[in-house]
Amino acid sequence: MGGESEVSGDTKVQGGDGEPLSKNELKRRLKAEKKAAEKAEKEKNKPAPTKSAEKSAVSEEEISPNEYFKLRSGAIEELKSTDAHPYPHKFKVTTSLTNFIEKYEYLKDSETLTDVEVRIAGRVHAIRQSGAKLIFYDLRGEGVKIQVMATANAYKSEEEFAVDTAKLRRGDILGVVGNPGRTKKGELSIIPKELVLLAPCLHMLPHLHYGVKDKETRYRQRYLDLIINADVRKKFQVRAQIISYMRRFFDEMGFLEIETPMMNMIPGGATAKPFMTHHNDLNMDLYMRVAPELYHKMLVVGGIDRVYEIGKQFRNEGIDMTHNPEFTTCEFYMAYADYNDLIEITEKLLSGMVKAIFGTYKVTFHPDGPEGEAKEIDFTPPFKRLRMFPDLERVLGVKLPSPDSLHTEEARLALDKICVSKDIDCPPPRTAARLLDKLVGDFLEETCINPTFITEHPQVMSPLAKWHRSESGLTERFELFVMKKEVCNAYTELNDPVVQRSRFEQQAKDKASGDDEAMFLDENFCTALEYGLPPTGGWGMGIDRLSMFLTDSNNIKEVLFFPAMKPEENKPKEDEKPKENGEA
């Protein structure tokens, strides 16, 4: 490097190629040779495991998942006896991956902030090796990705670089201490001084390119689904936004959020088949709640005029694309409101929610799954309204029995005849309420793509709703349908204790005739009504089903982290299960 001018006063010595060398240049060359010899010696004495670990890292991807698990578990057990325990208690994180990307987005190509040290952590999704001294890792977390550009030169020492990188596999939770930088190709990266294994992944992780497509695996191992499929997290974020928006909406209207019992002596508040459980100390059977309605109305009797609850309900019914045995609802009860007020509140709540989350009233939905036809759902208010009896008669082209005669056998037979003539299947018991429900389901609900209110149900279908003020035999009730499915049910509440008791008695008759979903008589609730329930509007909405429509999911299991599943037939035998790892 030093030119001839710098050493012109020195004595010249001949180099191996016959060129004259200065003494200084000779010294430099001898020093470099010595350093190279030392380095070669060091390489020779380097422990062999790194080489085999490198080799195994390549071949491990080609072996069976069971073999991989055994090998990885063995390697991790060995690490437990070293100073570098594979499950450390703590790793201090100074910035999230999201903040890292936002903060250092300005860096230019090939720029590294050597004076800035950050500590981040995430899961390793890809490992790309460019020789022994340069390895790239894709670190993922919070729905984002950061590249780790690990170089031996920037690491605390070359020996530790080889040892630390040999430990790592795809799927591991990794802590990175290093400097923010951008590669020559423009990729924002962190250049580590230290890599810390925080929790190894003992199983072979599916590749992001192929993903986890099998629905059984996705629902049973939701953690794996979340690790691999980025869009799953977004669905649950939208679900959380729906619940947050509801809470803000009702809080701003002066409602009090409440909690009511999950286990009851009588499963009231909805026509549904309940789950049973047993209380050992009281030696009595209890029912898991099917709805919180009766408790809410008791609180309105007590003077809390506006109450709402977001919580779980349990119904011992079928599992299908839109039903799960436990599900989440929001219910509210509002004194001095009727079903007309509730229609306005529903329109305001839903249209405002969709606009706030998506910036538009219109959302796309695929009823037959991602590969099927796309439908647009328009939440622009006001929503369409259908009156149950007049509109059903119009579609059927026949006259229905009058609503005030539906409790008679004559009316039941007339509905039965209509169902038979229209090829409508209704399993027993073929009560008037069930037959009518089937007709509405096949001829009115099927037309409801955009949000549509079906209003004015008959009293036989609505045991807790108040009678219609002008139409005999009907109630002031509505259901909101989206994409042919019910998402909301509301009515002016029945507050006459004498009428309520007679409605309960009719339900008891239906139960005796074999209708498992008919309501029980709740004497405590009737007593509460005798103290005076003000004119009240009551409302309930299924949050899971609404989440389906707003996340373009045609299966309810997509919007439940852990949906109900049938038991697995082929469970691993006891001796196949990995033993729990204790302390080193």
Image (spheres, rainbow, N blue to C red):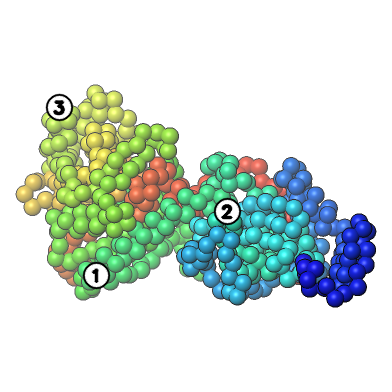
Q: In front here: 32 or 214?
A: 32
* Left/right of residue 573 with respect to residue 381 in the rendered view: right
User: What numbered label is drawn on residue 397?
Assistant: 3
Distance from disc 3 to disc 1, alpha carbons, whole Å, reads 46 Å
Label 2 element class: loop
Q: Nearer the viewer, residue 75 or 131?
A: 131
In terms of image quadrants, where is residue 349? bottom left
Do the CB atoms of the residues marked 3 and 1 lie less than 8 Å apart? no
Q: Name the residue under label 2.
A: 185
Earlier along the polypeptide chain: callout 2 or callout 3? 2
Q: What is the x, y in percent for residue 551? A: 38, 49
Q: Percent x, y for residue 184? A: 59, 56
x, y percent for residue 214: 56, 40
Q: Residue at x 25, y 25 (%)?
A: 422
Identify whether 426 is placed above or below 134.
Answer: above
Closer to the N terminus: mark 1 or mark 2?
2
Query: Closer to the observer: label 1 or label 2?
Result: 2
> How far is the residue under mark 2 from the one under mark 3?
70 Å
Viewer-side label of 3, 1: 1
Amino acid at pointer 2: Lys
Give the residue at the far left of this rendering. 470
Callout 3 secondary element: loop
Circle 1 sits on which residue? 252
Position of 105 with respect to 434 (left or right) is: right
Lower position in the chain sequence, tag 3 or tag 1: 1
Q: Residues within 10 Å of mark 1 (few under 14, many from 20)?
A: few
- Mark yes or no: residue 499 visible: no
- Name the amino acid type tagged 3: Gly
Query: Considering only vertical position in the picture, is 553 above or below 48?
Result: above
